[in-house]
Image: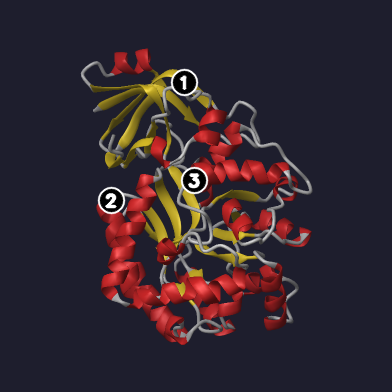
Amino acid sequence: MKIFRSTIFHTPQNPFEKSDALVVIEDGGLAIGDGRIVACAGYADVNRRFPEAEQIDWRSGCICPGFIDTHIHFPQTRILGALGHTLLDWLNEVALPEEARLADDSFAKTIAQDFISALAAHGTTTALVFGAHFPNAMGHLFDAATAKKLRIVSGLVLSDALLPQELRQSPEMAYRASKKLIESIRGNQRLKYAVIPRFALSTTEAMLEVCGALRREHPDLPFTTHINENTQEIEEVRRAYPHDADYLAVYERFGLISRRAVLAHNVHATDSEIDRLARSGAWVAHCPCSNAALGSGIFPMRRHIDRGARFALGTDVGAGTGFGMIQEAAQSYLMQRVATEPIILTPAQMLYLATRAGAEALGIEDATGDLSEGKDADFVLLQPPVEAPRRLAALLTLADASWIRQVWAAGQMVHEREN
């Protein structure tokens, strides 16, 4: 048993719905044992309950939940910073050639380890990860995540059109490989398989039917893909699927849109698409840094809120600008200030989008996303510079990876920054 004494910030409720959702405990005590949070309250009360616990004094810093990234590409770890592109030319010139390199087993293992280490170093304890096109590479990702105790939701990326030949599978091969990978992680509480077609442009109807079959056979599996990221992409989808009303309708036709779906971007969505997402219970992964870096546009957050569609944050490495979920929260604030229909995000909402919202999107809010008693002990110890303000708004605006001193996942320290 350990008690961490520090200022504590977390959002056990949704601050878009409740004005008092943010919990701030100035002199807080976070007690952990057996990988879970045993108590989170004022330090005096927690210490009184567990007087024999090991004491860790962190009054010079603060504690927040582990960050949850709802959209990130593990094969793209090494291509960050390729500026000057839009989506489709970036895919062809930068991303896809790099992803093809993961056919090399040794390279894939190295990238998987680097990726998981980078997540931990940036305080991300849970991530919905766009995987690789190669089953062996997926095995390395799952192995690296297990060794580090991170919670990873991921799966083989399925494509049988448009992409270079080495990144394609036949629908039959994709189905068999996916079934084998699903079985390989069964019973691992920190891993979950996801059904992941790359996007409508790179999948034929036969491949989307495979995705639908996997979801019918395993209805608990999450589904994730891309949607409405770029205007040129949307026009290409319209030509490829002329009988579907819009981009979302392609996925709906194969039974892929439900409460278990997380769709990345949705920058250029129609009102009808947002309404249908809201009715289905599906979530959007909002990736503000990537949207800016690729010139895709500004996410219509106000329209999503007004129409009842839910969203969380993703870094979209490597189209984004890094692994930092704090930076994504700050960028989401900045871009919404200059949106056509602006919204001023509160610090509580920014923290929620980087933590609890991601847990809700993945259906794991009973296990993680905030620091309530009984949750997994996934949390971050932040150490601001001495001169930095200790307000949540300042932390979310100023913090970067250098402020992340320790990261704990399932009650074990998985990263510690050297002094």
- Give the quarter of the figure containing the C terminus: top left
Q: Residues within 10 Å of mark 2 (few under 14, many from 20)?
A: many
Which amino acid type corresponds to the residue marked 2 in the rendered image?
Answer: Lys
Q: Residue at x 32, y 52 (%)?
A: 117
Q: Which residue is mark 1?
A: 25
Q: How is the image coloured?
A: secondary structure
Please report whichever mark, 3 or 1, sits nearer to the chain's N-terminal start: 1
**Relative to 60, is 279 on the left or the right?**
right
- Between the C-alphas of marks 2 and 3, the distance is 19 Å
Residue depicted at x 60% and y 64%: 84
What percent of the width, then of the height, locates residue 406? Answer: 33, 36
User: Which amino acid, mark 1?
Assistant: Ile
Tell me, for residue 296, which label it has, or none. none
Q: Write down the residue under mark 2.
A: 148
Classify 271 as above or below 123. Answer: below
Q: What residue is pinned by disc 3? A: 325
Amino acid identity at mark 3:
Met
Q: Residue at x 48, y 75 (%)?
A: 96
Left or right of residue 335: residue 193: left
Labels 2 and 3 touching (C-beta < 8 A): no
State the image coordinates of residue 166 (x, y, percent, origin top left).
42, 84
Element under disc 2: helix
Q: Is residue 134 visible?
A: no
Which quadrant of the view contains residue 59?
A: top left
Residue 344 higher or lower than 283, as above or below = above
Disc 3 secondary structure class: helix
Q: Position of residue 352 (x, y in %)?
A: 55, 38
| Residue at image location 75% in from the left, 73% down from the top | 245
User: First in sequence: mark 1 or mark 2?
Assistant: 1
Please identify the quadrant where the N terminus is shown.
top left
